[in-house]
Amino acid sequence: MRNYFETSAVNYLLETMEIQDAHATRAFQNARGRKWHISPTVLVEVLLTNNPDRKEEIIYFSQVLFDRELLPPPEEIIINFIKNGCPILETSFSYESNHSFSRIWRDLYDFPDKTFIIDLDDFRRRYHLVRNYYKVAHVIGTQKFYSEPYCFEASIELLSFNLVKKVMNEQEIQSADSNQLLSWKIGAFLTISILCAEITLFPEVIKKFWANLGVNLLPSRIEFIAKNFPQLIYRGPFAEMTQMILCQAQYKYSRGLIFDAFHCVYLPFVDTLISNDIHFKNLKSYFPHPIIARICHIDEAVWTKKAVELMPNKKNKVYVPT
């Protein structure tokens, strides 16, 4: 059984659990075959914490509590989905990633006294670029009327709809309701932005994908996807991301929108996604689907704290969500 903890849930556990109990909880869960995972997306949000002491506290706590294997970055999952032929049912998934963050994390797990040493300025720039760019997704999702028809947001929406028209025939578009059209449009926007334009946190695997194909120009990439992998706008990782974006479009824009959407990519591959973020709770109501039902908000779980003797004559409290 695999549980994925997104960033808000990690912060919640840090506030409620002593470090010795984190040690005991991991041992208890591992003994029962339960894996508690985080991801590179979580680590980026942690590493960009403004308070350096708080950052180190979260990193060390996570080293103690969570599994040695990070879940792969979302971009790796997207490329694997393409390589597997965009299947209706995803059955092939490797929990072991060779991404640089995953290799670093294994080293930190094995040697808890170590910490991350990376170029945070570069990641900070990339993080803010990604966060600010994907405001467009919220604008498209709200179906806002553009007072200026040639503004950036309107141009991006038009580009996205042009991809929809390449993928879906005229009859499908004419017969689709407004929600379906909007879903396709957001899926196309994500396909263009993440996969074709590489506007994302971990673009390395995407760069390698295109380099192997020898397709370098953005228009050529869009044409390639429309011809070979049209399913991307309505099936797979972008479909899970789309539902989170559409859900949040019902509310005021949140700066964490795109990162919440990235967390949703893991839903088909875990038993539970645990969050303390209201947006994930809202998503369960907005889109009642068996995959989305794997989300468990912190206040929906009963966290049992009980003394368990993991070593002779020594008891610790372990935390068991039920």
Image (cartoon, rainbow, N blue to C red):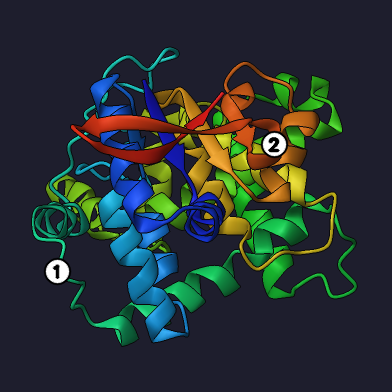
What residue sits 53% from the left and 39% below the top?
264
Q: CA distance from mark 1 to mark 2?
A: 46 Å
Please state, as top left, top right, bottom left or bottom right, where the N terminus lies in the image. top left
Question: Label 2, on which residue?
Answer: 183
> Which of the two discs, 1 and 2, labels the residue nearer the N terminus?
1
269 is higher (above) or lower (below) than 25: above
Task: Choose between 131 and 37: the one closer to the eye.
Answer: 37
The residue positioned farthest toward the front in the image shown: 313
Q: Who's the residue at 45% across and 22% down the image?
A: 271
Q: Which residue shows up at 23% across the image and 82% down it?
A: 119
> What label sits on residue 205 in the rendered view?
none
Instruction: Report the front residue among 242 and 265.
Output: 265
Q: For mark 1, does the 10 Å Cα neighbourhood hold few (<14), some (14 to 19), or many (20 or more) residues? A: few
Q: Nearer the viewer, residue 311 or 76?
A: 311
Name the residue beneath numbered marker 1: 113
- Mark yes or no: residue 63 visible: yes
Residue 127 screen position, x and y as percent: 44, 73
Please tell me whether mark 1 or mark 2 is closer to you in this view.
1
SS state under label 2:
helix
